């Protein structure tokens, strides 16, 4: 079912239009003003947006401008809906990048026809892109190794920039992209019934994450968040599927990589279940030291809450253990910075 976002400040028109679209078998999201519309678009990623022009807080032109600057929404088909019929208003909207322009009052068939036309156009463009990808992957230019795959993603994927704490995707979002970290660090994590966070993976520059099923439309099963300012390249999983179908050697390398990740996750779970507090803390510090780049003084910058999430313990318990390690001369602590002074002793802490 295709998802339509309707941004309209007239309550009666918004509700009537939403009902009309639902009867036409669309899932409808609504927003009463431009600011809320931008927020819904960024969090829900609709298939198409229908937006009024004259609205409080942020008008339709402002909505289109805001969404055109955001990588995940800039390509969503956008239809203006307004009572303004002057040619200069129509032209202004189209010049900004709108895909269509409907005037009020409109006929049901006119609205549904505009939506179906724009969605069909997007599907045709995606099919053409897929065909081009098949053509590009000739026998002379096949991607045969993980290293070549990373280069391919870097050259052909879409760049995304995130600040510390920004959400890259949320559990339940459409799993359209596989990501390659170019700069920074990313954590994947889940929340238990009490809202406690458990970090399932930490990814540094040159690491992949975001893999889901290639045969089923399964959403992301966890959250992904930037641990610092980060640059990522996203490749649509359909493109990756094409590459894998044509390159058996790459499939074997990727399976090996994913198998190693599973082994690491199993080790983490075993430590969480059976390891002592000291062993859990030591192992977690070693994991972060491996993933995070040290500064000039040899410090790693990491939140205590992130350390506790990986270790599977309360933050207060972790902080007490870190203080013990500090007193024993194993680490040095200053604010958020941790410096490992005795790597050998940290590695030899028993279960």
Image (cartoon, rainbow, N blue to C red):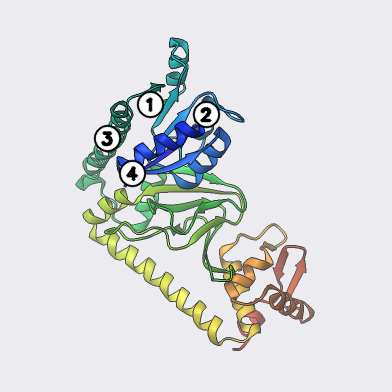
Q: Disc 2 designates what residue? A: 65
Q: Secondary structure at mark 1?
A: loop
Q: Which mark is residue 120?
A: 3
Q: Looking at the image, is mark 4 or mark 3 earlier in the sequence?
A: 4
Of the numbered discs 3 and 2, the one sitting upstream in the chain is: 2
Find the distance from the CA under tag 2 to the CA under tag 4: 23 Å
Numbered tag placed on residue 99 in the rendering: 1
Closer to the camera in the image, 293 or 285: 285
Q: What is the C-alpha distance between the residues marked 4 and 3?
A: 11 Å
**Of the residues under marks 4 and 1, which one precedes in the sequence?**
4
How much space separates mark 1 and mark 3, taking CA atoms?
Answer: 13 Å
The nearer-to-camera label among 2 and 4 is 4
Q: Confirm whether residue 289 shows in the render.
A: yes
* Residue 10 against residue 192 in the figure, above or below: above
- Helix, strand or loop at label 4? It is loop
Residue 238 is left or right of residue 69, and the answer is: left
Q: Position of residue 135 (x, y in %)?
A: 21, 40
């Amino acid at each position: 079912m295709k998802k339509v976002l309707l941004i309209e400040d007239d309550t009666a028109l918004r509700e009537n239009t939403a009902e009309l679209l639902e009867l036409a078998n669309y899932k409808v999201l609504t927003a009463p003003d431009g600011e809320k519309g931008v927020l819904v678009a960024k969090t829900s990623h609709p298939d198409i947006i229908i937006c009024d022009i004259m609205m409080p807080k942020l008008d339709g032109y402002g909505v289109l401008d805001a969404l055109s600057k955001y990588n995940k929404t800039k390509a969503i088909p956008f239809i203006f809906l307004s009572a303004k019929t002057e040619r200069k208003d129509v032209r202004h909207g189209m010049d900004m990048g709108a895909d269509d322009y409907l005037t009020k009052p409109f006929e049901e068939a006119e609205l549904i026809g505009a939506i179906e036309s724009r969605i069909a156009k997007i599907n045709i463009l995606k099919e053409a892109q897929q065909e081009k990808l098949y053509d590009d992957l000739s026998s002379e230019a096949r991607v045969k190794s993980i290293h070549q795959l990373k280069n391919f993603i870097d050259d052909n994927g879409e760049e995304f920039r995130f600040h510390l704490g920004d959400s890259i995707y949320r559990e339940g979002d459409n799993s359209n992209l596989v990501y390659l970290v170019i700069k920074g660090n990313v954590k994947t994590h889940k929340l238990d019934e009490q809202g406690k966070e458990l970090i399932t993976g930490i990814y540094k520059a040159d690491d992949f994450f975001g893999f889901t099923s290639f045969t089923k439309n399964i959403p992301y099963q966890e959250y992904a968040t930037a641990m610092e300012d980060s640059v990522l390249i996203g490749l649509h999983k359909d493109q990756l599927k094409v590459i894998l179908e044509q390159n058996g050697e790459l499939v074997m390398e990727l399976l090996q990589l994913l198998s190693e990740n599973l082994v690491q996750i199993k080790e983490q779970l075993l430590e969480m279940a059976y390891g002592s507090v000291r062993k859990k803390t030591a192992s977690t510090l070693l994991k972060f030291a491996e993933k995070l780049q040290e500064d000039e003084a040899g410090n790693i910058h990491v939140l205590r809450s992130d350390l506790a999430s990986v270790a599977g313990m309360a933050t207060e318990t972790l902080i007490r253990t870190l203080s013990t390690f500090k007193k024993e001369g194993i680490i040095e602590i200053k604010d958020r910075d941790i410096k490992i002074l005795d790597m050998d002793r940290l590695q030899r802490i028993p279960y």
